[in-house]
Amino acid sequence: GRPAHPAPAPAARTPPARPPPRDLPGPVGVARVALDVGADRVVVTTDLTLPRGRWSGSDLDVWIAWGAPGVPLAFEARLCEVPRDRLSADPGAACVPVAHEIAPRAPTHAALHVGRATMVGSLAHLPAAEVSRALAASGAATLRVREVHAMPAAGDDGAREIVARLGASAGRPFVLGTVEVGSSSGVALARVSARLCGPATEDASLAVAGEGARAGSSVPPPLAQRSGADDLCVRFALPPRHSRSVGARVMPLDSRKYCSPMTTVVDGVSVSGPDTVRRIDTSSENCGST
């Protein structure tokens, strides 16, 4: 006769984890981390230099953990050519936008990591054809990553802090070139400082280029000893009048320019993240005001 209960369906097989490509660009470096401080937001630009190295011509996925505080209001990644006489693309270079997606952690096939693999972030997809085109001019390309963060709240000492993620490959940290802090909108800055911050990092001050940087003993970023788990913590203070007007306002998410919110579900958890943007306009009025 019939069995009392039907046989269970065979369990779906989990596809095996894909390893990263074996032949990668390198040695990769973080050419610069630049903060542009506006009236109610901060734009963080991270330039990764990708020399051709042993790259075999495959597509590349680059994992980029989001900085802090909070979820970025906007995110973009672009691939740029590097002139023959430069180590990275010019700040105003015309670059090609690359596709990216939100993910709860770094996938196993990510070729490079910016920030720790267990953090929420974005996975940038670099097609082989675009990488080859960017490398053609000098044998190196720049992956330019931009995040827009709401102005962080001031601490007890009046300073505000932004955390930028740094990178590593196979556990080896990328060399950090320069740290730059300024304001294209004319916001006066004071007490600007930078340091490596991580679970096992000595609290050493890094040299910062820009207005309001603290004078004194500091280590040039390329000479700083760091681990692959280190982040970059940048602090700055605003004039008292500006601090009272900005306070702890959160930049609104309803601007038609690039601040519309997007909510996605990753591993059953709802995560509010930045919309996919093709251009970040750094003028503060494009994110409205409260």
Image (cartoon, rainbow, N blue to C red):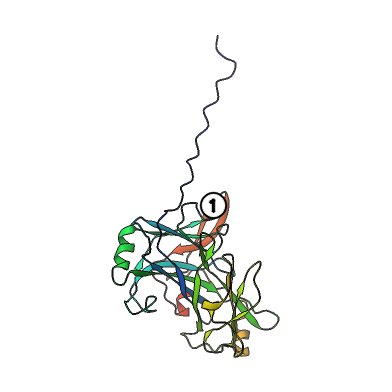
Image mark count: 1
Which quarter shows the N terminus?
top right
Which quarter shows the C terminus?
bottom right
**Residue 233 location in percent, x, y?**
59, 75
As drawn, 144 above or below 104 = below
**235 left or right of 21 in image:** right
In this rendered view, identify the residue nearer to me: 227 or 65.
227
* Residue appearing at x 37%, y 76% in the figure: 89
Q: How many C-alpha atoms fall within 10 Å of the one at disc 1: few (<14), some, or many (≥20)?
A: few
As drawn, 17 above or below 200 = above
**56 left or right of 287 in image:** left
The amino acid pointed to by label 1 is: Val
Which residue extends farthest top?
1
In this rendered view, identify the residue nearer to me: 171 or 141.
171
**Residue 111 location in percent, x, y?**
45, 57
Q: Quadrant of residue 224?
A: bottom right
Q: Is residue 289 visible?
A: no
**Residue denoted by label 1:** 266
**Residue 185 location in percent, x, y?**
47, 85
In this rendered view, identify the residue nearer to me: 155 or 26.
26
As drawn, 158 above or below 49 = below
Q: Secondary structure at mark 1?
A: strand
**86 left or right of 239 in image:** left
